[in-house]
Amino acid sequence: MSSGRPSFYEWLIATRYLRSTHRRGFVSFISLTSVAGITLGIAVLIVVLSVMNGFAHELRVRMLSVTAHATLEGLDGTLPDWRVDQAAALRQPGVIAAAPYVDNYAMLAHGQRVIGTQVRGVVPDEERKTTGLAQHLTAGRIGELTPGAYHIILGSALADDLGAKVGDSVVLIAPQGTATPTGIEPRMRRFYVTGLFHSGVYEYDSALALISMADAERVYDLAGATGIRLALEDPFRAPQTVRALAYALGGGFYVSDWTKKNVNLFRSIELTKSMLFVILLMIVAVAAFNIIATLVMIVKEKQSDIAILRTLGSGPRNVLATFALQGVIIGLAGTVIGAALGIVVAHNVEFLVHSLEHLLGTRFLDPRVYDMSDLPAYVEWGDVARICGVAFTLCALATLYPAWRAARTQPAEALRHD
């Protein structure tokens, strides 16, 4: 009766044992708890990793909406012939837009408050094409940054820290000084706040101010742009595209891209995701140990049944397959139900969180702290396949020892002690 694959009667006996009502259904109960444990572990894993994916996806989208995909800067800090470089960049395959800019640091003073910040000089018409800051203005228009007007647009958090609003004036203090008969004096210029932006990325909202590029050149005493910001068709090919552009221009440039500037952030997210996968997998491992306990109890209880099967002609392989199938069925049921539950919860996590917040009268995500009021979740099918594969493998391995013990049962010994 031995064969290479489970036969019908092996499936029949395996499912019958799992539904056992002997001893008040205790075996059936612990089988259900095993399925529940696997279901819970897989569902939690999928939801947690989906939330991590959602945070990374939301962060990536927000960053790409407010920052350049790549930048090309001069090694000495300036690009005197930036118009030539800009035209060459626009001819490069994959480049949508190229905008010159001046980047530097300054102190902004308003009343008694003085805050250090990054100042970016831009050409409004070009800036609209390369980043989304122009679409994130909550007050004013980027077109108001006209040369010689000395207008400035502040990040929302920066404006709050300064206590400045549209219509106020701030004093920009450049790090460079001006030589006078009385010594070196700081270079200062009064700017008028004509707009505010809120990008959703605190790094920009709290430490970035936009002014006209022509005004920035005057304030920082520059003759040309410090670099060119690029918008690309495929942001994920930014490293290759910007390096190809630098080679096409003959080299001598400092190149950077959004993946390089934020590599530590996204690497930490991936590391956290991997650690959570390992830690939460322990729930599934505990459920797998529960399968071992379940099958050992079934083998112990069914000693006489195993002996009868052996005397009727069942071989050790048939007995092993019968009990291995029980563990596989438990693992398969828990994996399928857990995956379905995890996907459903992940797709509805925002609704569930809002419902729980309403029920408890609290906020889990304060937008003033996290810059988002919703809990994002993004299900990656690769993660689902990996979770289900590892979980099912653990469950299958858990069946080996109890099934091996059942296969080694000697009919005479089992019937003697029955």
Image (cartoon, rainbow, N blue to C red):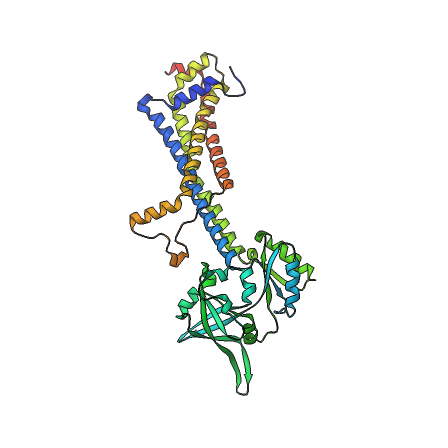
In the rendered image, the vertical position of residue 67 relative to residue 400, given as above or below: below
Quadrant location, the C terminus: top left
Q: Is residue 36 at all visible to an observer of this figure?
A: yes
Q: Position of residue 408 (x, y in %)?
A: 47, 20
Q: Is residue 408 at all visible to an observer of this figure?
A: no
Instruction: Please state if 113 lies on the left or on the right of 357 as rendered.
Output: right
Q: Position of residue 347 (x, y in %)?
A: 42, 43
Instruction: Please state if 364 lies on the left or on the right of 179 as rendered.
Output: left
State how many labels appear: 0
Q: Quadrant of residue 27?
A: top left
Q: Quadrant of residue 339?
A: top left
The residue nearer to you, when weighing 111 against 149, is: 149
Q: Position of residue 209 (x, y in %)?
A: 48, 68
**At x 31% / y 49%, what residue is drawn?**
358
Q: Position of residue 344 (x, y in %)?
A: 41, 39
The residue nearer to you, when weighing 312 against 381, is: 381
In the rendered image, the vertical position of residue 374 relative to residue 16, given as above or below: below
In the rendered image, the vertical position of residue 270 relative to residue 291, given as above or below: below
**At x 48% / y 30%, what residue is drawn?**
396
- Residue sitting farthest toward the bottom: 181
